[in-house]
Amino acid sequence: MNRRHAAIFALYVLGVAVPVNVFSADSGEVSSGESQSQETSDAGRQTDDPRAVVAKWMDLVLADNVRESWELTTKSKGLNAQHDLPRLRNKHKVRIDRSLGNEAVAVVVTNTVTHVSSGVDRAFAFWLVQRDGSWLINMSYIDDPTSIEEQLRGFFMGGGVKWRVTNDDLVGTWLAGPGAPGGVGGSSCGSRFQLRDDGRFSLEMWGPGGPNDGIEVKRGAWRLEEDRIIREQDKQRLISRISWMGSDLLVLQPADQKWSNGKSGTHYRREKSDKT
């Protein structure tokens, strides 16, 4: 096991061991200049959240303020982004894409960028830990975005984390193959799930003959509560849980099903032509 993966494993174990008390998990982009703060239960004071710490660190590194950026870290030698970030040909376009974590450990990932030496797409991953009531970067590296996606999936398997998304992340049209339509049970050979920004939804379902051989449609109202999509239809209240959220991937499960690695449940892909 190389040094980088050894560090990831250590943090993953820490993520498993901590209590199930979640600070956030989201997929919306923020610029490196934006920051938010939250109150820590231990110190009872305001402290930057992991996204803000990474954004501030990137600003300092790009401004060549190495000494100040070092104060936002655990002084680990595994800060590969310290060297790779200034060398990117589009370094000023790097943005925070998403974060996932609990009260003790977190991972923050950037958008996809082009690495100068290789010319291929890469993404930065930052692993943070809580030290004396503050978030500090323990390590960072640049890797294939697909590999980082799998690591986030592994982090989610540790438990104690959940997706916290916004209505804007979900509004649009989602397409799925065989599975539980809308992630609430039952089965269909395919479905189209449209979530509108006015709080209405439509769910189209079809059998083995495909959508051209008869479609059943359900309509009603929907709302979002953290990682739950709540639908009101036909005098029923149906709740599905977001068990995985990527840029164009939404995995839904029945809310009463125990958390899993996101490989089960109904996998929806965003309809590419749909910008709403």
Image (spheres, rainbow, N blue to C red):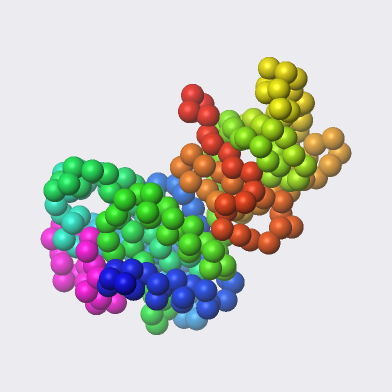
Front-most of 229 and 266? 266
What percent of the width, then of the height, locates residue 266? 64, 44
Q: Position of residue 115 (x, y in %)?
A: 20, 47
- On the image, the x and y values in percent for residue 218 come to 76, 30
Quarter placement of the N terminus = bottom left
Q: Which residues are magenta?
A: 60-81
* Rendered position, 99 above or below 133: above
- Residues 261 and 105: in front is 261
Dividing the picture into quarters, in which one does residue 74 lie?
bottom left
Q: Residue at x 31, y 45 (%)?
A: 112
In reply to whether residue 146 is colored magenta, the answer given is no
Residue at (48, 64) in percent of width and height: 155
Residue 103 shows in this picture: no
Question: For this view, does 212 lie left or right of residue 170?
Answer: right
Q: Is residue 246 something that shows in the picture?
A: yes
Query: Compared to 195, does 130 lie above or below?
Result: below
Residue at left 44%, top 71%? 12
State whether residue 162 is above or below residue 72. Answer: above
At x 14%, y 48%, the residue is 117
Tell me residue 244's x, y (percent): 55, 51
Front-lying residue, 44 or 148: 148
Residue 115 in the figure: left or right of residue 35: left
Instruction: Please name whichever residue, 149 or 223, is drawn nearer the observer in this view of the structure.
Output: 149
Hey, which quadrant is residue 47 in on the image? Answer: bottom left
